Image: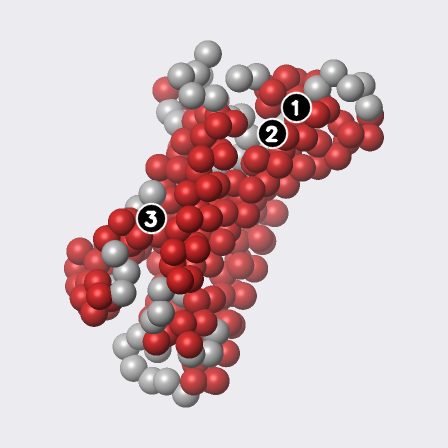
Amino acid sequence: MALVPCQVLRVAILLSYCSILCNYKAIEMPSHQTYGGSWKFLTFIDLVIQAVFFGICVLTDLSSLLTRGSGNQEQERQLKKLISLRDWMLAVLAFPVGVFVVAVFWIIYAYDREMIYPKLLDNFIPGWLNHGMHTTVLPFILIEMRTSHHAYPSRSSGLAAICTFSVGYILWNKEYQRRTRFEGEVHDFGCRYMDFEVCLRCIEHCFINFSETEERSGLRRRFVKFPCIGFRHEPVNINELITRECTI
């Protein structure tokens, strides 16, 4: 039995994201008043993705508790769809975007913070909020991965979804540039930001092949299960899913 039930951890993480989002939106910054508001920042989009994901996790836990022992086939089908949505969102959005934001932010911050987080922002954003947006995302998602079972989508559907998200963000960035007619270093950063994500996709692809090789050789248990897009979806009996989700 876990020291802290995973259901409690999910609720705590969801509340922390709600607190971070509320505190961030309460800050009066000039950039929040321009076209696009906070939605032009990938960090804010990532926070919304994480909050929605953990909201789905909490909803899944509640549905599992209500469905357990009811014997209602319709409720079980709805629960299965909810679990599939949760696992799909983890593999396609929550994990890759979360890791990408944390990794790229701190790499660029260490190289030249003025490129991504100028010192001027210290007057608006406190240190704890900065870490809440750019640091805690990674341990939170790793906790979710290690405390719960997840079935991941196929490689083709995962790649299609993450590419759709990437293209959508690039188009939104281009629209923001067109509306504001802003030129300069920050103006072009959005597209270079997504170039890093292409690199991240390549790293994940290498990890996928390595993991599958280790699985075939019987050594898979030594490594952590990351929700990379190459893991095949394995059908699981609904009763096993309900038991696994409701176990505290």
Residue at the disc numbered 1: 65
Query: Residue drawn 48% across and 28% down?
Result: 8
Q: Residue at x 52, y 53 (%)?
A: 162
Residue 159 in percent (x, y) is at 54, 50
Residue 206: horizontal and vertical position, in percent? Answer: 39, 41
In the rendered structure, the answer to whether residue 229 lies left or right of residue 31 reads right
Element marked by disc 1: helix
Report the amino acid beneath label 3: Gly
Q: Is residue 68 visible?
A: yes
Q: Residues within 10 Å of mark 1 (few under 14, many from 20)?
A: some
Q: Position of residue 154 (x, y in %)?
A: 59, 40
Amino acid type, label 2: Asp
Asked if marks 3 and 1 touch (Cβ < 8 Å), the reply is no
Rendering quarter of residue 37: bottom left
Mark 3 or 1, nearer chain start: 1
Mark 2 falls on what kind of element? helix
Foreground: 73 or 188?
Answer: 73
Q: Amino acid at mark 1?
A: Leu
Residue placed under numbered mark 2 in the picture: 61
